[in-house]
Amino acid sequence: MLPVYFGQKQSVSERADEMAKVLQRVEITLRSFYVFNSNLSQKEGEEHKKILFYHPNDIELNTKIKDVGLSEAIITFTGTFTSEDDCKALHTQKTTQLFYQPEPGFWLVMVLNVPKEVKLKEGVEVADYRGGEVSDRIYQAVLRQCYHMYRFHHGPLQTKLMASPGSEEAEEQRQQLAAELKTFYDRYLATLKDLAQCDIMDMLHSIQYLALDKSLFLRAHNFSMLCDTFTAVKECIMFYNDQVVCGGKLAASDLYSLHAYVLGTVSAVGSVDTFRTGAFVLEGEKPIAAEVYLDLDKQIRPHCLLIYRALNVTLCLFVDAVPTQEFYEELHAYLGPQLSSLAKDIATASKLNASASATTATNPDDGSAKYLFINEQSLKHHTNIHRNAKSIPRNVMSIIADLANPIQEISAAEELQVKTTNDYWIVKRRCNWRQYYVILSKSKATTLLDVTQEAKRIFEQELTDDVFFDK
Amino acid sequence: MEKPNGIHYIELSSNFIRFDAVSQLTNVFFDDSNKQIFAVRSGGATGVVVKGPVEDTVISFCMSDRGGAIRSIKFSPDNQILAVQRKENAVEFVCFQGEQPLLQDIITHQVKTLIYGFVWVHNRELALISNTGVEIFQIVPEKRQVRSIKALSISIKWFAWCCDANVALLCTTEGNTLVPVLIKQKVITKLPKVDLGNPGREVQESKVTLGRVYGVLAVLILQSNSTTGMMEVEVHLLNGPGLAPRKCHVLRLSLVGRFAINTVDNLIVVHHQATATSLLFDIALSGEVIDNVTYHAPITTGRSIKPFALKLPSLSPDGQILQCELYSTNWVLFQPNIVIDAKLGCMWYLNLSIEPLCNLISDRIRLTEFLLQRSSGKQMLLKVVQQLMGDQYKGTLLPVLETIFDKINKIYASWVHMELQNQTALPANVKSTTTKNTAPPIVLIEQSDMVQIFQPIAERPFAETVFMLYLQSLNKYNISAQEELSKMIISELIRNRSFDTLRRLVSYSMLLESKSVACFLLAHSDVDSAISQMAIDMLGKIQAHEIIIEVMLGQGKVIDALRLAKNSLGIDKVPARKFLEAAYKTQDDLIFHSVYRFFQMRNLRNYETLAFPKAEQCTEFIQHYNNTFPPDSANKLQTS
């Protein structure tokens, strides 16, 4: 990764800042988001053609062209120093730009307004841009997910532009793709999670698996044998509320996209009562039969997604084509009783779990130590950090994001202790493809020894589920 | 009639017994207690030939015809006393020395009652059943005495005897009740009477059969259904409190005519003479239940016994072959499974031929239930399951397989549980009273058997699903997976790249946790680093730290290994040379430096010097350290 810094990097001393009174704080926001492919405009005067999508739409075309041009320039410029798709992020005083090239030639760029604090300094309002609080890696991941979500619904971009360049057909396809991107991203960006809330979990794309006991797990797992019973069903994924019960053989990114999609869809369709005995999730009058693209057997192919729900269990079935009414009925007859009985048993079991863990739940804003454990292999995490509650300052979260190891890296033991400017301590350990973080807030530990002791105590207290020799 | 090449599920045994056929001179008797057949020529004067229970066991002797036709003749269990009844009120006892009778020492025991029959209950004890009751006598050959030991007084119309259970069923003159009586050495126990429903009901002797089914004595009564007129068999099992008989089952024959009943391998076989077919019933299978009585239909439609060709002794080399007449009027059946053709002079045992029968039961689950109760069912059942997973595999059969696995494992689990109890529950000084209950189940299919039949389907697309179903079934009955099965599951999951499932199986400890399985995982760690993590997790669970250290050293993670060695072995026991060597091999100066410094600090603490003890043989590494980090350069660093 090569961050390129333009303009002024924050040089004002932090202490002087703290003296000034903060009048207002503006969190990170999305400034613009665009998709382009330079190969689409070879001639001068056709620059607008390379822009496949630009958000916000209601600005002058010239500005769009300029923005895209600048991005192209930076990418090319960076490319002279390193390989072609190595341009990841650009920091300016007021913005952070993130670049992502998911398919050859196609670039996604996300421009963020960095958080700013308006301060009163000697009677004058001064904007203080906090670019350092923006973690590249977190927002890289957000950008990547923008692409994966599109691919999940519409398939790879490349396949939309198959006609030979320059032909009329190619232009038609370009327009079609642009229209498709517009419909998709207008909706997607409108429902995008508040960027200020994005954290390490968004970065890791981690999904929580439901902890079940052995026999329930096997029952749930073996439910997927319905793929053998109904050969039309290619894959079958089970969720319980927002947790994954069985992920089948889906690639992690597909599973994450599916998870996001299903949560959005299912939560919109009403109460559990509708699904007491199991039913297909409807879209209007008809059961949902969405076309989605999955990376199965190293091939991205469209599948038809059916969503069946019984109580809190959501079953996602992937079939080859939109099924007939008889097939729905046949499936319903098979699934209804079995899935609702399974759902009841899971509910009973997870209630027991919940009541057991409720005693250890802590108040989100107290000063107690926070911890975060991540298994790099399963992406399972275990934490007492309440998401979306500001229990952890942005800068601490950014440091964790920077410390977190990319998943595919060779695992070596690490032990790190970081002290932040606002008196937080972060203790990181890494072993056997697992990362452990303990975040200690200001009050307690002050010396390295204290911090080590306190972190050790928490590791020993909380690391009960993962068996590991070096606690 | 059946075609000769039709399917037959019952056959006559090939180890039959030939004897002299009934004629004007020869009388034939059969003792079902000793399974001996007596061919008596001229009342014994010209010879008695006793054969059984197999063809080779022959006793032959002569005895004088003492007038009066022989009514019954039976050896004591040790073949040392022969009891012969020639008159209706007397029994003679002939003592034997070796295989020859001592004809001068015949003891005649005379009674005042009408003897219906007698049975040996012990080598020297005999029970006489007469019209006034049951009496046990002891025979004392040395004193030529017969002593009465025990008597039960009851007026009897007829009786039936079951030698396996030592139970006589008495039909009383008063009220026509059927009273089972347990007759053992010196003991006569009257059991609760058979409930015939209607108090005035009279049961004929020919309609009653005693047999043992699944270890329980059964009184089988043939009778016609009051509404349809079709014949039925009432099965009264002596399994109530105090061995009280209870009417538990009714076998619907849906035929009329003459019947005879045998039991083969816990199946009730009802022969029908008119159609020359035999119906099979298994009371362990489910049926229609009305008022706590289960009504059974035959397992499959009636079929005839397999035709039997008897090779007659002949001088010509190809011999003469006689097709035996089946269901002949000359047939006499004895319990449990004996067929005697007195005219032909042949005695057979009835056997079940299980393979053809399997083809007649199309419901695989019912077939599994059936085979699990058959003494020869194991191989057949394994074959059936193998076929289901092999040639006949269809996705829709998975629920069937699931049910079959459950049925197999239910029995397997009870056996495992029982064995475990026997191993743990008995302190050495306590008399083992429970051991007698530990007969293995009729069909016991263990994990190792299943692994055998799983082997051929490995690497087929559906293998993972099938194995996981089996694992689920094992888990349902609290049986843990053994090494072979664990490895097979691991192989399939890795082949299908189902790492998530594998990870969860390992974390739930559903696979065997052993060094061998962990090393098996390690061997596949090049496929995905996830496997390496699982292997180390498993080793961690079983505290196999030495292996983890070796693995980490092998992966070049010297620091990780050192940290673990320090924690698990204790700082004093960490071998310096081994770690220095591994650190040296990484060719990473930083790692080497760290490891070297670690041991220097250890030296300082233990020996109060930085130097390594000679015994650790670290000279080459000391040299390497000094070359890589010369002392003067360190000084320079410090000063600069």
Image: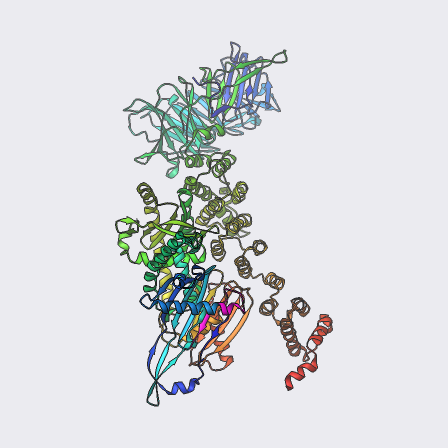
A146 drawn magenta: no
Res. A38 visible in picture: yes
Nearer to us in this view, B574 or B389: B389
Horizontal and vertical percent for residue B440?
51, 41
Horizontal and vertical percent for residue B146?
51, 26
In the image, what residue occupies the spot 36% across and 80% down?
A: A117
In the image, what residue occupies the spot 57% across and 18% down?
A: B49
In the image, what residue occupies the spot 33% across and 31% down?
A: B195
Relative vertical location of residue A207 with respect to residue B175 in this rendering, above or below: below
A83 drawn magenta: yes
Q: Residue furthest top?
A: B24
Relative vertical location of residue A53 with respect to residue B627 in this rendering, above or below: above
Nearer to us in this view, B216 or A151: A151
Give the magenta range.
A76-92
Horizontal and vertical percent for residue B283?
40, 33
Relative vertical location of residue B502 with respect to residue A118 in this rendering, above or below: above
Q: Residue A183 sits in which quadrant?
A: bottom left
Horizontal and vertical percent for residue B5?
49, 20
Nearer to us in this view, A174 or B445: A174
Figure label count: 0
Res. A205 visible in picture: no
Nearer to us in this view, A287 or B51: A287
Q: Residue furthest bottom?
A: A122
Residue B393 placement, left or right of A187? right
